[in-house]
Image (cartoon, grey):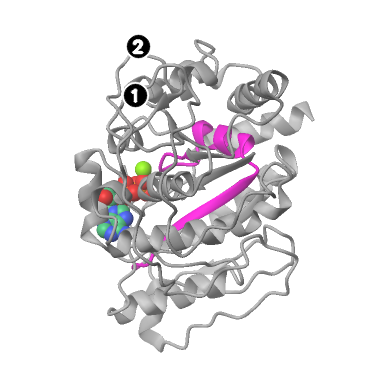
Amino acid sequence: MRRIAIINQKGGVGKTTTCANLGAALALSGRRVVLVDMDAQANLTLSLNTQPMSGSLSSYSVLTGGARFGEALRNTSTPNLSLLPADIDLSGAELELAAQLGREHVLREAVEAWEVDARQADGRAPADYVFFDCPPSLGLLSVNALAAAGEVLIVIQTEFLALQGMSKLVDVLKLLKKRLNPKLEIAGIVPCLYDSRLKLAREVLAEIRGYFPGKVGSSVRSNVKLAEAPSFGRTIFEYAPESNGARDYLAVAREIALAESRDPDLSSLPPIAGTAPRPRAPEVLVSAPIHDASGAKAPAESPAEEPASVPIPGPSAPKKTESKAPAKKKKVGSVRPPADSAPLATVVLAPKAPPPAATAEEQSTSPDAFQALESGARRG
Ligand SMILES: Nc1ncnc2c1ncn2[C@@H]1O[C@H](COP(=O)(O)OP(=O)(O)O)[C@@H](O)[C@H]1O
Ligand SMILES: [Mg+2]
C-alpha cells in the first residue's frame, strides 16, 4: 500500500486539485484509492461533493482518537475512491495535539492499525494508495501526514516565486527523514497551472527541473475545467473527461504508477494505459456509501506533454539549473544545485528579490514542525 503526502506549504498551487484528480485517475484505472483531507478548509472534501459537518467522523476524529481510520471513510461518486473528510474542527487539532505524547505519529498509528486489521481479516492491504492532502503550512498536521507517508509528492505552481520557500520544505523533509520517518522518499514533483505560452512559466519549469533533477514529471496545464469541476463536486473525469486537465492527470497517474513494481502489494497490477479503462464495479472500502457511483467516462488519449520522470530520487549527482534565461529570470529566484547527494538533498535558494509578506494562504514553516521534530528526536 503506497502512502503519499501531497505537499507544499504555499496555498493555491494545486495540491487539492492534484489529490482529487490524481486519486480519481488511479481509481478509474482499477486501483483502490483513499484520499485523506488534512486541511481544515476542507477543500478536498467539498471538491468530492461531501459536506464537511462538524461533529461527524472525519480526519479530526481520527487524530483525536474519536474514530478509527477505517470507520471514518466515506465512498465518493467515483468507484474505488474513498475519502476521509475534514471539517472546521480540524483547525483546533494542532492545539489539541500539542501536549500529547507522540503527537507526530497519531495519523501513522491510525493508518497502520487500519492496515493491520485489514490484512488479518482479508489477507491484503485495505487500499492500494492513500493520499494525504496537506494544509498550506508545515505544522503538526503536515508533520503527521509526512510521518504516516512513505512518499512525498511536491506540487509546484509554475509562476513567479514558485521556488521561494522550497529550501525550507526540503530541509523539513530531510529532518523528517532523519528523525521521524527514515523511509520517506520524494515520489516526484508535479508542476501545476502550467501555461507553456508564457515565457515566465517555461523559465520557472526549467528552474524547477534544475532544482529537482530527475524528479519532475508531467506538467498539469492551466485548464479552466479543473477550476470548475470542484464547484460541481466532481472530479475532472466526471466533469470534463475529454479536457486537457483529464489528460494531464492521467499522464501524472501513469508516471506515479511506474513505481508500483517496487511495492509487493501492487507489483501485479497492470500498467495504466494511454486511456483510462472503463470503471469497473466499485469495490466497497467502507460500509455506508453516501453517493451513487456515477458513470464516469474515460478520458481521451493522453499525450504527455513533458517527458516521464524518474519518480524516486536516487543519490544522483547534483546538476546545474537548466534555465538559460537572462538576468530578468533572477526575479524567479536563482537556484544553486544541491550541495550533497543525499536522497532528500538540501538545495539553497539565493533569491534576488525580497520575499513578499506571507498571506494566510502562503504560510511558511510554523514552529510546530520543528518543535514536533525536536521532541521526536529527544525521545529518540
Ligand atoms: N491546472 C489548473 N488549471 C486551472 N485552475 C486550477 C488548476 N489547478 C488548480 N486550479 C485552481 O486553483 C485554485 C487553487 O488550487 P488548489 O488545488 O485548491 O490549491 P492548494 O490545495 O495548493 O491550495 C483552485 O481554485 C483550483 O480550482
Ligand atoms: Mg488545498
> Above or below — where is 249 with respect to 52?
below
Asked if residue 42 is positioned above or below residue 214 in the image, the reply reads above
Where disc 1 sits, the SS reads loop
Visible in this render: residue 303? Answer: yes
Along the line of sight, the residue nearer the viewer: 146 or 269: 269
Q: Which mark is residue 55?
A: 2
* The C terminus lies in quadrant: top right
**Is there CB contact under 8 Å for labels 1 and 2?**
yes
- Residue toward you, 208 or 56: 56
Where residue 127 sits: x, y (%)?
58, 34
> Is disc 1 surrounded by few (<14), some (14 to 19) or many (20+) residues within 10 Å?
many
Q: CA distance from mark 1 to mark 2?
A: 8 Å
Marks 1 and 2, the one that precedes in the sequence: 2
Q: Position of residue 118 (x, y in %)?
A: 65, 22
Instruction: State which quadrant residue 327 falls in.
Output: bottom left
- Mark 1, residue position: 87
Stretch in magenta:
133-160
Q: Name the amino acid type tagged 2.
A: Gly
Which numbered tag is attached to residue 65? Answer: none
Q: Give x and y (percent) for residue 101.
A: 65, 17
Q: Which residue shows up at 38% across the image and 78% down it?
A: 202
Report whether 373 appears left or right of 162.
right
Q: Is residue 97 above or below residue 259?
A: above
Question: In the image, what residue occupies the spot 47% across and 77% down?
Answer: 206
Q: Secondary structure at mark 2?
A: loop
For residue 194, which quarter of the picture? bottom left
Identify which residue, 306 or 373, lies in the foreground. Answer: 306
Q: Percent x, y for residue 21?
A: 38, 49
Residue occupying the point 35% across, 54% down? 298
